[in-house]
Image (tube, rainbow, N blue to C red):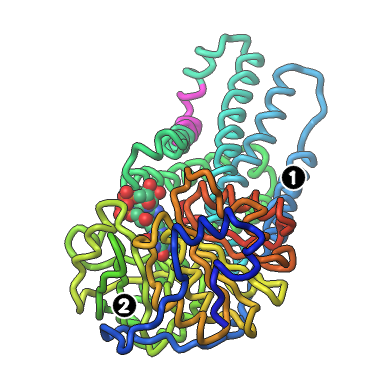
Amino acid sequence: MTTEVADSRLAAYPALSAYLRQTEGPQVPPMPQAPPRTRPRPRPRATTPVPTMRVTPTALRNGILAGALAVTALWAAQAEPSARLDVLFATGAHLTGLLAGYGVLVMLFLMARVPAVEHGVGADRLARLHALGGRYVLTLCLGHALLALCGYAAHAGTDLLSATLDLLGYPGLALAGAGTALLMAVGVTSARAMRRRVPHETWRAVHLLTYLGVALGFVHQLAGPDVAGSVLTVWAWSMLHATVAVLLVWYRVVVPVRQALKHSLRVIDVRDEGPGVVSVVMQGIGLDELRAEPGQFFRWRFLRRRLWHTALPFSLSAPVRDDTLRITVKAIGDHTRRMRRLKPGTRVLATGPFGALTAHRRTKRKVLLLAGGVGITPMRALFETLPGGPGDITLLYRAGSAEQLVLREELEEIARGRGAGLHYLLGRSDASFDPLAPQALRNLIPDLAEHDVYLCGPPGMTASATAALGRAGVPEERIHAECFTF
Ligand SMILES: Cc1cc2nc3c(=O)[nH]c(=O)nc-3n(C[C@H](O)[C@H](O)[C@H](O)COP(=O)(O)OP(=O)(O)OC[C@H]3O[C@@H](n4cnc5c(N)ncnc54)[C@H](O)[C@@H]3O)c2cc1C
């Protein structure tokens, strides 16, 4: 069943019907007699979720909190109760220092790209957690330094400046100070206002200083009283650092290199999909082994001039088939503009799959896929593959105008083939009629509250659609959103 937006249900809503007629006209035009190009026709095919180990967001949060409690217990076991000011400062410095050391490790772990965490929590949510947690960790680092200085000054009876100069005379503390300064630099370049101004590559290069900062901090912690106090704590603290280091090296270096050597991925086709949008089709060897699921993304590095130095995230816009992967890319910056000129034969290094916007999140028979702009890419793959009978799957595709719709032929063919609903919601985002308002959504899908909703679009649309879905009766835990920004 291919549904049309302006169907009988809308008769009672003249404003919406008029809007839809004015913006789009017939929703599903007749298919051309013969396919105009050698585009591989989508074979409607529903797949069941691949069983993969996944850490849920709740389990991750509980694990992090349990670790923080264990660190606090380690501090409490060694803290000596005292009413002396210098001891109070020192005790506070020890707690903040231990928590900062632990927090830095958690931040690195979140970015280690461990598949069970990536697939269960989602890269965008991990990035948000990392950004939020980073602020706490920096606050703890600064708090630790300040409390230690105050403790020393109170103990020696000097002012803070003299205390600072004295403490920097100790090589171990000077290194710790340098480590803190590096982490601060990382924090400053990551602040939202700065991040917008700094090119991604510069931001990334500064971010690499984190590793040096952490190494310096680790040396300082091993010498400090809390960890150095017992062989067991030195061993446990070192093991914790070693584990995170191994995970980072394994999943960020070894696995990508192995994947590159094994799958030998190359561009085989680049085709226009609409204004400023191209699909890049790549072929490799044994791609099924990647176990990439519809809705997921890879980080792609195209080995050609002025593109090789950056790995850009793009979602699969079609399921993996016949050893080919396809992405659909909107040109918004220098790198995405260059991708239009990729030549067949270009080698590609792909790392992944990442992301949790997959079939495993589904809890209901009925699913609404809601895409905005180029956010259609993961939705296109899910639209074809999410299991379901006629009427179970509906795709709403929001775009500024009909010209901006991409992959339209495929979407309509999938809708027809599997009896899914497909509606285009066209019009400027500042127009008086909002097709994503709660009532408008309920008019299109009367049993909306009985759906799982998968949502992908620009941050503004994602936020307003999430709020509207909530007001239309969809519980938060059934709204599965992914943002195309980290
Ligand atoms: C999980 C995910 C899936 C995505 N899927 C798609 C897709 O299917 N189709 C599509 O067109 N776009 C997708 N994007 C967006 C796409 O990655 C960016 O548009 C692209 O990286 C911009 O690169 P640029 O250098 O041309 O633009 P720039 O103007 O240089 O960058 C624009 C913004 O993109 C982000 N960005 C740039 N480089 C990187 C990088 N190496 N890693 C992470 N973010 C970066 C930065 O936030 C930057 O502010 C996705 C993004 C994410 C996070």
Drawn side of residue 451 relative to residue 222, left or right = right
Residue 446 image point, x, y percent: 70, 65
Circle 2 or circle 1, nearest the eye: 2
State the separation of the CA atoms marked 2 and 1.
Answer: 53 Å
Quarter location, residue 409: bottom left
Quarter location, residue 327: bottom left
Q: Secondary structure at mark 1?
A: helix
Drawn side of residue 77 relative to residue 139, left or right = right
Q: Amino acid at mark 2?
A: Val
In this view, the residue in front, 467 or 352, is: 467
Q: Is residue 326 among what the camera can see? A: yes
Q: Amino acid at mark 1?
A: Leu
Q: Which residue is mark 2?
A: 281
Specify start and end residues of the magenta stretch as a single range: 167-179
Picture residue at 61% right of the left edge, 30% below the top:
144
Q: Which mark is residue 396?
A: none
Picture residue at 62% right of the left edge, 62% below the top:
480
Residue 268 image point, x, y percent: 25, 80
Write down which quadrant ligand 1 falls in.
bottom left
Q: Which residue is mark 1?
A: 74
Establish if 42 lies above or below 25: below
Residue 306 image point, x, y percent: 19, 58
Picture residue at 54% right of the left edge, 16% below the top:
163
Q: Main secondary structure of the magenta part?
A: helix
Tell me the crowding category of disc 2: few under 14, some 14 to 19, or many 20 or more residues within 10 angstroms, Cα based: many
In this view, the residue in front, 363 or 9, is: 9
Drawn side of residue 340 relative to residue 353, left or right = left
